[in-house]
């Protein structure tokens, strides 16, 4: 056999073996990539949250709705990113009106952010802080924590500590129809049910949109009449719902805007 030919054959075989080894090694590295870079094997974790503006005394807040695919917690933070409250463990599924109590002597007022966290330790105990963020991390959506922000205002109180109750809309008088180029006149009777003087706002809305707002100062148990003169130019002809609203109360009616 020709020595040169034999040597060339051996070189080709060695090259093939090296190539196979490289491919196998690369496959092994790729298969271990998540472990090498400290990430977990991909898995879908979904969550959503709704946190609306509200008033309170600073000791707790209410989360309107939260949904978790894998259980977890709702964590409330203040404007400085300090955790001011953590909910009890929540099982996977949908939850409504979740109460989150204040932590220690923190105050749950101002602009707050509610973030949904997973229970990665599976022990139903929030461990995000004590593990420096390694465990019980937030649910993510497009790479960002699933969260919602709300403003919590302090409930006004009388000198004796009595909470301030919303003004009441006792009655509303308004026409059932109005021309599209006309002004609607609405009369409402508003009462202060508190045992002390207080100031609150009253709004007139069409289809939820605020068209006029007043601020009323009423004495204890005082009743007053308020008249709204609202230009409906810009409101589409057709049937609409109007309302007179206070902080937590309101009266609705139907209004037809006739095309002129």
Image (cartoon, rainbow, N blue to C red):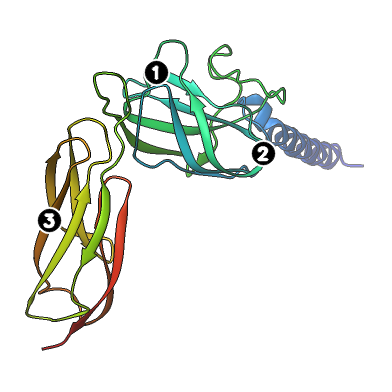
* Residue 5 drawn at (x, y percent): 83, 42
Q: Residue at x 72, y 22 (%)?
A: 123
Q: Secondary structure at mark 2?
A: loop
User: N-terminal of the two: label 3 or label 1?
Assistant: 1
In the orientation shown, which residue stands out farthest toward the right? Answer: 1
Residue 199 lies in what quarter of the image? top left
Q: Secondary structure at mark 1?
A: loop
- Give me the disc on residue 226: 3
Q: Relative to the observer, which residue lies in front, 132 or 11?
A: 132
Read off the residue under disc 1.
Answer: 82
> Marks 3/1: CA distance?
44 Å
Q: Secondary structure at mark 3?
A: strand
* Residue 80 drawn at (x, y percent): 32, 20
Residue 232 lies in what quarter of the image? bottom left
Residue 218 lies in what quarter of the image? top left
> Marks 1/2: CA distance?
25 Å
User: N-terminal of the two: label 1 or label 2?
Assistant: 2
Q: Residue at x 65, y 20 (%)?
A: 125
């Amino acid at each position: 056999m020709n020595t040169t030919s034999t040597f060339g054959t051996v070189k080709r075989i060695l090259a093939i073996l090296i190539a196979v080894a490289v491919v196998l090694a690369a496959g092994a590295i790729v298969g271990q990539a998540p472990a090498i870079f400290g990430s977990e094997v991909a898995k879908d974790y979904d969550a959503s949250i709704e946190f609306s503006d509200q008033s309170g005394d600073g000791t707790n807040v209410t989360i309107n709705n939260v949904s978790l695919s894998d259980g977890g917690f709702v964590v409330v933070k203040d404007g400085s990113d300090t955790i001011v409250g953590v909910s009890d463990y929540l099982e996977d599924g949908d939850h409504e009106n979740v109460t989150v109590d204040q932590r220690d002597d923190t105050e749950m007022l101002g602009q707050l952010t509610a973030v949904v966290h997973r229970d990665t330790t599976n022990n139903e105990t929030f461990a995000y802080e004590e593990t420096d963020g390694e465990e019980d991390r937030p649910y993510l959506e497009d790479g960002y924590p699933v969260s919602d922000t709300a403003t919590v205002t302090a409930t006004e109180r009388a000198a004796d500590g009595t909470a301030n109750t919303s003004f009441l809309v006792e009655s509303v008088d308004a026409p059932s129809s109005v021309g599209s180029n006309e002004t609607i006149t609405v009369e409402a009777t508003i009462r202060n049910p508190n045992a002390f003087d207080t100031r609150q706002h009253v709004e007139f809305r069409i289809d939820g949109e605020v068209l006029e707002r007043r601020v009323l100062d009423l004495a204890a148990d005082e009743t007053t009449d308020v008249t709204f003169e609202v230009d409906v130019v810009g409101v589409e002809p057709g049937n609409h719902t109007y309302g007179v609203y206070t902080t937590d109360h309101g009266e609705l009616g139907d209004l037809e805007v006739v095309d002129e």
